[in-house]
Image (spheres, helix red, strand yellow):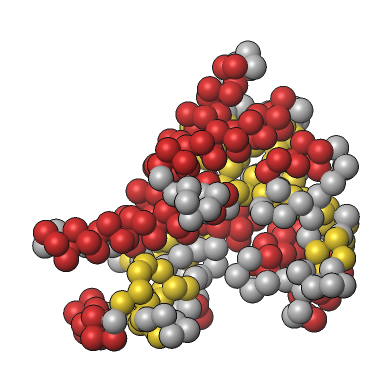
């Protein structure tokens, strides 16, 4: 990168834009993005250049639901999953970039923010495609699930007695298609919102790239991006101030720091990090550091500033 500035990739959860079941509207999500923007601009003020990755789980769920209802009620065409991912990147990116732009202006910082609709290539031979396990979309009755399976070739599973749901693969990222554009933006000092929802999963075909029905884990995609741009730090912003062992149990221990070796040991023990929440984050961080990353930090949005100063958060080092 041109003059040596500190570059961080910051991964924020799709759930961090939705505070609760009662706060799911676009207006509510915009307000949450506004709060997040304050913490991101604090980082910029502290001398960091940043690329922002974000989740999109709840938002893609809403887009799919709207599509299903429109199909049922009005016979409109249903949206393919890759297009839902692209839609969510645009809408969430818009919300974040506008709030970041407003916050920069408020503080008199002469920088801009931009969203890149990002395609992330996956390997069609990734074993994840043999065992789709990521539930998406709404619950349905068995007869409807069977119909979707027959007509659209969807993989359906019965989910904990709550009904049937579609499951898709969650393959690993192998290439970020817009990488050169992302690098150019970061180099120019632009706050770059990218790999939204883990990126739109695409595969190589004889005709070129094509979207595929899958979901890439956003922490893995953000970690992959951090390695690709040689970032100084991967910061995963989540619901907790620190990573804990025995989370939620009487013997819970909050960690200030851990090494890759310790992280792997805790992962192997299999009791510390929740499967759908902290485990993928720690796995993504281990991957980032093993591929040459310098350091990673996990904390909640409101503590980003303090964590960067070493006052809180969990720091993970090689």
Callout count: 0
Of residues 266 and 199, the one drawn nearer to the viewer in this rendering: 266
Task: Find the residue positioned furthest to the top.
Answer: 108
Residue 24, compared with residue 124, is above or below; it is above
Residue 261 position (above or below residue 107): below
Viewport quadrant of the C terminus: bottom right
Residue at the front extreme, as displayed: 22
Residue shown at 70% from the left, 29% from the top: 42
> What's the residue at 74%, 46% (across, down)?
233
The single residue placed furthest to the left in the displayed view is 75
Q: Would residue 266 be visible to someone looking at this image?
A: yes
Q: Position of residue 187 (x, y in %)?
A: 61, 31
* The N terminus, quarter of image: top right
- Is 208 placed left or right of 182 in the picture? left
Direction from residue 92 to residue 185 in the image, left or right: right
Q: Quadrant of residue 43?
A: top right
Residue 17 placement, left or right of 2: left
Going 83% across and 76% down the picture, which residue do you hit? 265
Residue 309 is situated, as x and y percent measured from the top left of the image, at 85, 37
The answer to whether residue 294 is above or below residue 100 is below
Residue 125 seen in the current view: no
Against 23, residue 171 (above or below) is below
Q: Quadrant of residue 141?
A: bottom left
Residue 271: x and y in percent read 76, 79
**Measured from the top left, where is residue 117 in percent x and y?**
42, 44
The residue drawn where x is 30% and y is 66% is 206
In the picture, measured across the screen, residue 180 lies left or right of residue 108, that is left
């Amino acid at each position: 990168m041109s003059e040596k500035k500190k570059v961080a990739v910051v991964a924020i959860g799709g759930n961090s834009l939705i505070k609760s079941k009662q706060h799911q509207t676009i207006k509510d999500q915009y307000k949450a993005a506004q709060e997040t923007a304050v913490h991101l601009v604090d980082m910029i003020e502290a001398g960091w250049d940043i690329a922002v990755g974000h989740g999109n789980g709840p938002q893609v769920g809403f887009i799919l639901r709207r599509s299903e209802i429109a199909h049922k009620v009005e016979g409109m065409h249903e949206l393919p999953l890759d297009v839902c991912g692209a839609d969510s990147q645009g809408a969430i990116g818009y919300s974040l970039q506008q709030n970041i732009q407003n916050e920069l202006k408020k503080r008199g910082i002469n920088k801009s923010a931009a969203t890149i609709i990002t395609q992330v290539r996956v390997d069609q031979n990734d074993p994840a495609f043999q065992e789709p396990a990521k539930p998406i979309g709404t619950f349905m009755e068995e007869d409807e699930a069977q119909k979707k399976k027959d007509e659209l070739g969807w993989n359906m599973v019965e989910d904990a007695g709550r009904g049937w749901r579609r499951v898709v693969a969650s393959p690993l990222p192998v290439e970020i298609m817009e990488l050169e554009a992302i690098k150019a933006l970061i180099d120019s000092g632009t706050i770059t919102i990218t790999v939204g929802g883990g990126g739109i999963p695409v595969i190589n075909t004889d005709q070129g790239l094509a979207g595929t029905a899958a979901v890439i884990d956003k922490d893995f995609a953000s970690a992959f991006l951090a390695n690709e741009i040689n970032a100084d730090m991967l910061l995963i912003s989540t619901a907790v101030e620190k990573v804990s062992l025995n989370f939620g149990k009487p013997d819970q221990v909050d960690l200030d720091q851990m090494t890759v070796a310790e992280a792997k040991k805790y992962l192997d023990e299999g009791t510390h990090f929740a499967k759908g929440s902290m485990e993928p984050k720690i796995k993504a961080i281990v991957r980032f550091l093993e591929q040459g990353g310098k350091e990673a930090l996990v904390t909640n949005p409101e503590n980003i500033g303090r964590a960067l100063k070493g006052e809180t958060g969990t720091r993970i080092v090689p």
